[in-house]
Amino acid sequence: MNLSLIPSIKHINSGNFFLLAGPCSIEGEDMALRIAEKVITVTDKLDIPYIFKGSFKKANRSRVDSFTGIGDEKALKILRKVSETFDVPTVTDIHEVSDAEMAAAYVDVLQIPAFLVRQTDLVVAAAKTGKVVNLKKGQFMSPSAMKHAVQKVTDSGNNQVMITDRGTMFGYQDMIVDFRGIPEMREFAPTVLDITHSLQQPNQTSGVTGGRPDMIETIARAGVVNNVDGLFLETHFDPANAKSDGANMLHLDHLEKLLSNLVAIRKTINTL
């Protein structure tokens, strides 16, 4: 993947990891713009290449009464407005073949959710849009198995592909990151570490996924030390009242300190 081919991405020659970050789901225009403005201020200060993340809908929820979105077109238009307002690229996840062409009209990167990364028709549909494709590693898959998902994209005529590790199931209610997988997956494509979803605690009896946001910096530091190309995180100014995944999100107020520490580590790693 050539990072410079992503429209409006900045700071690509800084030597930093790139960042995909934003809210779990698009809850409204004001919240999306507020989060984007804060993250952009921080990433510009630290020379971090940045892609704004926001799900236009949430198709994978624990309960039928969970929040799924504000409407597909409405949310996608907000993603476009974020891009136009701040001159920043955007990424959103897709769940059905029909989503690929629709979302590609609004965003720069299409993300395949972890539970769907083996769905050939979905991966191929994303690839054929010509957009960058971000493949989330399935919680049930080995790092080496991701080479086949990558090949589905490249065999479809699209070399703009990356892998994101979001942890592996460790029992019924916990995730774990196997850092041995990072160098292995980097042989197939640029590799990103999702430092918030990898701290989820799924399958809670309440039907609401838990998490360990107190461990975000621990996981992130280990990823940077092990040469991940990018980091992925979800952040919100009020995680406790976020419509989805609030339990494992990073509070927006903590973003600058976290990224400052990680940039310092990357600078050290770059000298070794």
Image: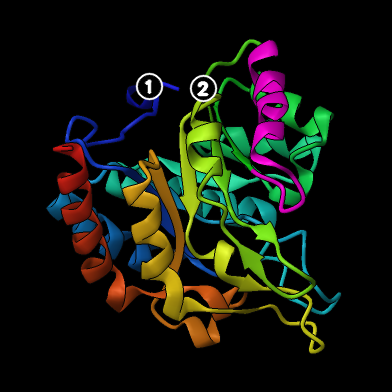
Picture coordinates of residue 253 (x, y %)?
28, 78
Tell me which corner region of the image, top left, top right, bottom left or bottom right, holds residue 201: bottom right
Q: Secondary structure at mark 1?
A: helix
> Which residue appears at 24% of the width and 32% of the height?
12
Task: Name the chief secondary structure element in magenta.
Answer: helix
Crowd rating for badge 1 (residues with CA inside 10 Å; few <14, some 14–19, many 20+): few
Q: Which residue is pictured at 69% across the width and 44% down the height?
A: 94
What residue would you read off at disc 2?
A: 160
| Magenta range | 137-156
Residue 101 x/y as whole percent: 68, 30
Q: Nearer the viewer, residue 141 or 33?
A: 141
> Which quadrant of the figure contains the N terminus?
top left
Which residue type carries mark 2? Gln
131 in relation to 192, above or below: above
Q: Which residue is mark 1?
A: 5
Q: Is residue 224 above or below residue 134?
A: below
Residue 30 appears in the figure: no
Kindly identify the amino acid type of the residue bearing the numbered disc 1: Leu
Q: Are marks 2 and 1 in contact (CB under 8 Å)?
A: yes
Residue 80: x %, y % from top left: 46, 45
Q: CA distance from mark 2 to mark 1?
A: 9 Å
Q: Is residue 20 left or right of residue 259?
A: right
How are the colours assigned in the image? rainbow
Residue that appears at 20% across and 59% down: 41
116 displayed left or right of 18 = right
Whether residue 90 sits left or right of residue 165 in the image: it is left
